[in-house]
């Protein structure tokens, strides 16, 4: 299973433990739902307005209309929106609006990573971190975490710090 980015390996037994990293980001935008706003955004989204697709998906997501949110994130992703790809990946990873599907999540994360989306790149690192019986999994995870950290992703910076602290795939530092 893929473990969320705010969880890390325990140095003694390679188990995952919850970590409260000060780098965690919370969505604080106000997405109060109104049918009128949804219809307005849907009209724009149906005219291939990618920003409207993402705003509509967010509106649905933050108001627990997960299936509709996933539809619009995927649609935005099909129009080459890295943010849409990343958000669709998160929803597949967490099983929101769909069955949980780590392979589908990874597909979306890799597509967004091709466009240098820092959060998606970090999630690819998380994917490799969580592989069981994979030779070189920590080295591969570090590669992705470094790339995301260089792009400013705070979760990746936190994850990379834990890797160096515990010497996973690298010398402790």
Image: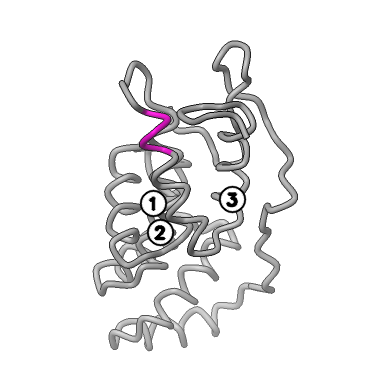
Q: How much space separates mark 2 and mark 3, taking CA atoms?
A: 18 Å
Q: Earlier in the sequence, mark 3 or mark 1?
A: 1
Image height of 37 relative to 58, above or below: below
Q: Is residue 11 left or right of residue 125?
A: right
Quadrant where the N terminus is found in the figure: top left
In the rendered image, the residue lying farthest to the top is: 13
Secondary structure under the numbered disc 1 in the rendered image: helix
| Residue pointed to by mark 3 | 157
Between disc 3 and disc 1, the foreground one is: 3
Q: In whole angstroms, how far apart are the C-alphas of marks 1 and 2? A: 5 Å
Identify the image quadrant of the C terminus.
Answer: top right
Q: Are marks 1 and 2 in contact (CB under 8 Å)?
A: yes
Q: Which residue is mark 1?
A: 89
Residue 95 shown left or right of residue 27 in the figure? left
Where residue 145 appears, as percent x and y from the top left, is 47, 47
Numbered badge on residue 119? none
Q: Which of the pair 17/97 is nearer the observer?
A: 17
Please, what secondary structure does the residue beneath circle 3 have? helix
Q: Residues within 10 Å of mark 1 (few under 14, many from 20)?
A: many
Q: Over which residues does the magenta segment extend? A: 137-141
Residue 44 image point, x, y percent: 38, 88
Q: Nearer the viewer, residue 144 or 15?
A: 144
Q: Does the magenta portion include 27?
A: no
What residue is shown at x 59% (from left), y 50% (from top)?
Answer: 157
Q: Please tell me the numbered disc located at residue 86.
A: 2
Among the two numbered marks 2 and 3 on one chain, the one whose residue lies closer to the N terminus: 2
Q: How far from the left and from the top, in percent, is residue 32? A: 66, 73
Structure colour scheme? one colour
Q: Main secondary structure of the magenta part?
A: helix
Residue at image position (29%, 88%) is: 47
Residue 54 higher or lower than 138, as above or below: below
């Amino acid at each position: 299973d893929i473990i969320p980015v705010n969880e890390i390996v325990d140095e003694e037994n390679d188990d995952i433990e919850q970590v409260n990293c000060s780098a965690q980001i919370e969505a604080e935008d106000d997405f109060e739902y109104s049918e009128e706003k949804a219809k307005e955004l849907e009209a724009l989204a149906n005219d291939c307005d990618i920003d409207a697709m993402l705003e509509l998906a967010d509106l649905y997501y933050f108001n627990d209309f997960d299936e509709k949110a996933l539809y619009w994130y995927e649609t935005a992703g099909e129009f080459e929106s890295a943010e849409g790809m990343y958000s669709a990946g998160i929803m597949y990873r967490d099983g929101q609006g769909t069955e949980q599907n780590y392979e589908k999540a990874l597909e979306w994360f890799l597509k967004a990573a091709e466009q240098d989306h820092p959060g998606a790149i970090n999630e690819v690192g998380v994917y490799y971190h969580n592989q069981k019986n994979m030779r070189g999994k920590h080295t591969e995870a570090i590669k992705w975490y470094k790339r995301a950290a260089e792009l400013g992703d705070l979760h990746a910076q936190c994850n990379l710090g834990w890797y160096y602290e515990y010497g996973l795939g690298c010398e402790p530092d």
